[in-house]
Amino acid sequence: MKKYLVLLAAMMMVIAMVSGAFAAQATVSVNATATVTSICNVHGGTLPFGTVNADGVDVTVDAAGGISIQCTKGTSVAITNDGGLNGGSGKNLFMDGGTTTKLPYSIDYNTPLTGDGAAGTNIGAKGTGLLSLTGTVTHSAAEGVIAGNYSDTLVLTLSY
């Protein structure tokens, strides 16, 4: 029995020495990093004027459309346009009907998202916005324009 007690005592000493070997600790810090980039996605629409009558009645034809904008939260954007395909500039543009005349129209950005398009503004905490566009063809602009189908392609550029 003494033999077993001596053996048991020896085993306990070995266990104590081994567990003592694991008593020290080492630590390390792990830094987690990520970069979130500013990005904007834009989905366009149309600006449908419908029928414009140039029959001597002083009528202005308006059209409304919208551009859906989704950006990284907190991104500031400025919006400009390229003047369209038919020699316009800024908000004063032209639709072409394949004739010798062009149909003048104007656009406005009707939302706090852009103001006049000259300065960047924040699109809000959600990072999404709807840019409302309004187009106008005045009666005086339509006078003298040859009958036909008129169109223009306007490219809006978001700078962020």
Image: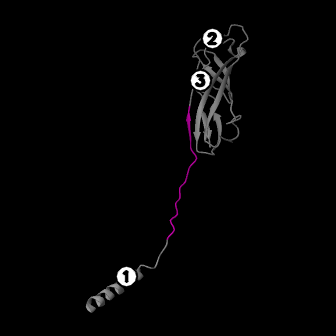
The answer to whether mark 3 and mark 2 are in CB contact below 8 A is: no
Is residue 37 highlighted in magenta?
yes
Measuring from the top left, give residue 17's x and y in whole percent.
38, 85
Is residue 40 highlighted in magenta?
yes
**How many neighbours does mark 2 have within 10 angstroms: few (below 14), some (14-19), or many (20 or more)?**
some
The image quadrant that residue 71 belongs to is top right
Q: What residue type is labelled 2?
A: Ile
Helix or strand or loop: what does disc 3 sit on?
loop
Look at the picture and state if 8 lies above or below 111: below
| Residue located farthest toward the bottom when viewing the structure as drawn | 2
Helix or strand or loop: what does disc 1 sit on?
helix
- Earlier-in-chain disc, 1 versus 3: 1
The one of 134 and 140 positioned closer to us in this rendering: 134
Which residues, given as a range, are shown in magenta? 28-43
Helix or strand or loop: what does disc 2 sit on?
loop
Q: Which amino acid does label 1 sit on?
A: Val
Indicate which disc residue 54 carries: none
Residue at point 41%, 79% (across, down): 22
What separation in Å lies between label 3 and label 2 (alpha carbons)?
Answer: 16 Å
- Earlier-in-chain disc, 3 versus 2: 2
Q: Quadrant of the N terminus?
A: bottom left
* Camera-side mark, 1 or 3: 1
* Camera-side mark, 1 or 2: 1
Mark 2 lies on residue: 146
**How many neighbours does mark 3 have within 10 angstroms: few (below 14), some (14-19), or many (20 or more)?**
some
- Earlier-in-chain disc, 1 versus 2: 1
Mark 1 lies on residue: 18
